[in-house]
Image: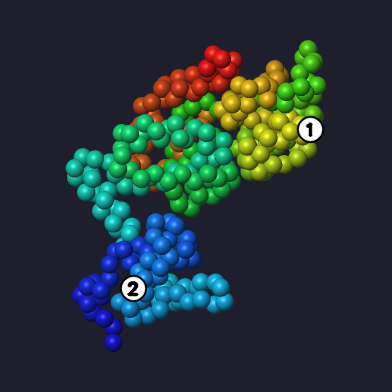
Amino acid sequence: MPLSVQKLASRLTFRQLQVFKAVYEKQSYSKAGELLGLTQPAVSSQIRQLEQALEMPMFEYVGRRLFSTPAAERLAGAIGAIFTELKDLQTDLAALEGKVAGELRLVAVNTAQYVVPYLLRAFLDLYPQVSVSVTVVNRAAAIQRLNDNSDDLVIMGMVPTEKPLASLPFLDNELVPVVPAGHPLLAQHSISAQEFLSANLLMRESGSGSRLALEMHCQQQRLAVKASMEIGSNDAVKHAVMAGLGVAVLPKLSILPELGVGSLKIVDIPGFPLRRSWCVVYPQAKHPTPAMRAFIDYVQQNIKQFEQLFLRNSILWQAPAGQR
C-alpha cells in the first residue's frame, strides 16, 4: 500500500535527494561522492536510507555497471522539479530583500573563453549570491543551445541574423594572421593575403566562428582559402603553428602570452586584422531572470572599462619582459 504523503515526508531528507540526484546523474557512487565531498560508504548509506523510506530499489549493478531502476527514473523527474522550485524560491526571496540571487547559466564559444573570466570577476563581487556556470562550446553547438533555449545567455561573435535573437556587442575581437618565430614569410618585405593563405593554413573545424569570419572575408575579397589541416580548438591551432605545421588566423586575445615571448609573430597583411565583436546573446522571446538582467545591465554599463582592460592587457603582454 502506498505511503501517505505525511509519512513519506517524515522519512525523506533533502540530503538523501541531493545524494540520489548526484548518483543518478553520474551513474556512479564514487563520482557522486567526489562531487558532494562524501566518502563512498556515506553515499551508499544515504541511498540505502532513501530506498528504505520509499520501499523500492533505486539502483542495481549488472556486472560492474550501475543502472537506474524504473523507480529511480520516476524519482529523478520529481527531484528535478523540486530543485527547480527551490532555485526559484531562492531567487524570489532574494528579490523580496532587494538582492539578486539564483543561477546564471552562461555558454561561451571557444574564442570567448579568454574574455568571460574577466567579465565575471567584478560581476560576482557585486552579486555574490549568484551561482554561475560556464560551458565552452563551438559556434555550431552554441547556436543549437540557443535554439533549444537550454541556457540563460550565450557569449559569441558571429550572431546568426536569421533568428529572432537579442544581442549586446561589448568588445572587439581581433583575428590576426600569425606565423611561428623564424618563419620564411617574416623575411619578406611585403606579404600578400593570398601568399599567406597558401602557406599551409591551419584552420578550425567547420562551424567555428573564427573560421566562418575568415571564409566570409576571403569570399568578399575573392581570395582562395583551403585548410591544410583542420584542428578542433584555438589552443591546438596555436600550438600547431608554434610547432611549425603552418600558419593561422587566431583571436589576438588568445595568443597574448605567445606574442609577448616572441614564439608567435603577427604578420602585416592587407585586409587584416579582421574585426568582429563579442556579444551577449539570447532569444528575444526569453523572459530574463533577475540574474540574467543583472548580468546584461552590468556588461552594458561597463563596455568602456572592458575595452580599456583588454587594451592594457594587450600592451602589457607585448612589452619586453623586463617592462611588465
Q: Residues within 10 Å of mark 2 (few under 14, many from 20)?
A: many
- Residues 323 and 314: in front is 323
Q: Position of residue 7 (x, y in %)?
A: 22, 77
Count of picture labels? 2
* Residue 202 position (above or below residue 75): above
Identify residue type, mark 2: Leu
Q: Position of residue 189 (x, y in %)?
A: 78, 12
Residue shown at 50% from the left, 41% from the top: 108
Which residue, given by chain and number where applicable, does mark 2 sit on? 50
Q: Residues within 10 Å of mark 1 (few under 14, many from 20)?
A: some
Instruction: Please identify, in this view, whether the residue under mark 1 or under mark 2 is nearer the observer.
Output: 2
Given contact means CB atoms under 8 Å apart, are the residues at marks 1 and 2 in contact? no
Q: Secondary structure beneath disc 2?
A: helix
Q: Position of residue 217 (x, y in %)?
A: 67, 29
Identify residue type, mark 1: Asn
Which quadrant is the N terminus positioned in? bottom left
Q: Position of residue 47 (x, y in %)?
A: 38, 71
Residue shown at 26% from the left, 51% from the top: 90
Q: Secondary structure beneath disc 1?
A: loop
Q: Viewed as shown, does residue 31 lie left or right of 121?
A: right
* Residue lying furthest bottom: 1
Residue shown at 19% from the left, 42% from the top: 97
* Residue lying furthest left: 97
Which residue, given by chain and number where applicable, does mark 1 sit on? 200
Q: Is residue 224 visible?
A: no
Q: Is residue 171 visible?
A: yes
